[in-house]
Image: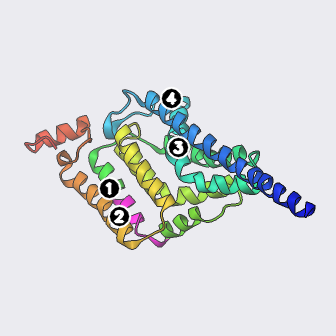
Amino acid sequence: MLLNDKVAAASPARKSAGTDPTAAALTATLGLAAASWVVALRQMNGMDMGVATPLGSFAFFVAVWVSMMAAMMLPGAIPAVLRRAHAGGMRAVPVFVGSYLAVWTVVGVAVYALYRPHGLFAAGAVVIAAGLYELTPLKQHFRRCCRDSARSGFEYGLCCVGSSIGLMLMLVALSVMSVTWMSVIAVIVLAQKLLPAKAAVDVPLALAVLGLGILIVIAPSSVPGLTPTMADLIGGASHGKLF
């Protein structure tokens, strides 16, 4: 009888010890994501110039990019973070999150190296490519990988880059400093990470992105939030229209 009482008393203690790291990880991850949104919005204030948005200095852009990635990607990474906390305790969480964000930081460095201010036609072409990528088996493979258990934040980051790279290039093409496009794409990324793949949802979404790209190419004035560049204005004026 005494032994049973001790076992019964120990069970809640073990359960509490097991759930505490996951609760702490959840709170810390959501807190970091919320703080990153605040930082990103302040950094991006007044920077949006549409498709012709300059990136600024390397240090400035990397700081903005890291805060953006933390804001956009961490909410969807919560299941993976909680699995890591459950398996390795709270001490494993900072390493997992840090290495995850390091992967996205490398992507940001590549974006900075390759990015050039561009026109609406180029932006539309990138959006079309992003829509087509959403329909590929490669995209579906990486999306499933994002929902599976990852051994490290680095591995998880690679899976998520493969899953979300089309949408992120879409953000860069439309305006990397746009709060509106950042918010829209963040919602899509979050939904794709937390919800299972369903053709009834995923295919219409991909077609919507594809349609947006086509609309940007042929009728950009009908797309809210697009800022024409001087070249677009001159080109449109030469044809007797704004776009």
Q: CA distance from mark 3 to mark 1?
A: 24 Å
**In percent of the image, x 52 and y 43: which residue is there?**
69
Of all residues, the one furthest to the right in this rendering is 2
Mark 4: give few (<14), some (14-19) or many (20+) Cα within 10 Å. Answer: few
Marker disc for residue 57: 4
* Main SS of residues in magenta: helix
Amino acid carrying label 2: it is Ala
Crowding at mark 3 (Cα within 10 Å: few <14, some 14-19, many 20+): many
Callout 2: SS: helix
First reached walking from the N terminus: tag 4 or tag 3: 4
Quarter assignment of residue 231:
top left
Looking at the image, residue 238 sits to the left or right of residue 18; the answer is left
Mark 3 or 1: the one toward you = 3
Q: Return the x and y of residue 154 as percentages of the image width and height.
A: 67, 53
Q: Is residue 129 magenta?
A: yes
Quadrant of the snapshot with the C terminus: top left
Depth check, front residue: 165 or 2: 2
Instruction: Indicate left or right for 120 with 91 as reference.
Output: left
Where residue 16 appears, as percent x and y from the top left, is 74, 51
Distance from disc 2 to disc 1, alpha carbons, whole Å, reads 14 Å
Q: Which residue is mark 2?
A: 206
Q: Which residue is mark 3?
A: 69
Q: Comparing marks 4 and 3, which lies closer to the viewer?
A: 3
Above or below 215: residue 230: above
Q: Secondary structure at mark 1?
A: helix
Crowding near the residue tagged with mark 2, few <14, some 14–19, many ≥20 C-alpha atoms within 10 Å: some
Task: Please name the residue that numbered disc 1 is placed on.
Answer: 125
Q: CA distance from mark 3 to mark 2?
A: 22 Å
Quarter of the image holding residue 94? Answer: top right
Q: Magenta span covers which residues?
A: 128-137
Determine the CA span between mark 2 and mark 4.
34 Å
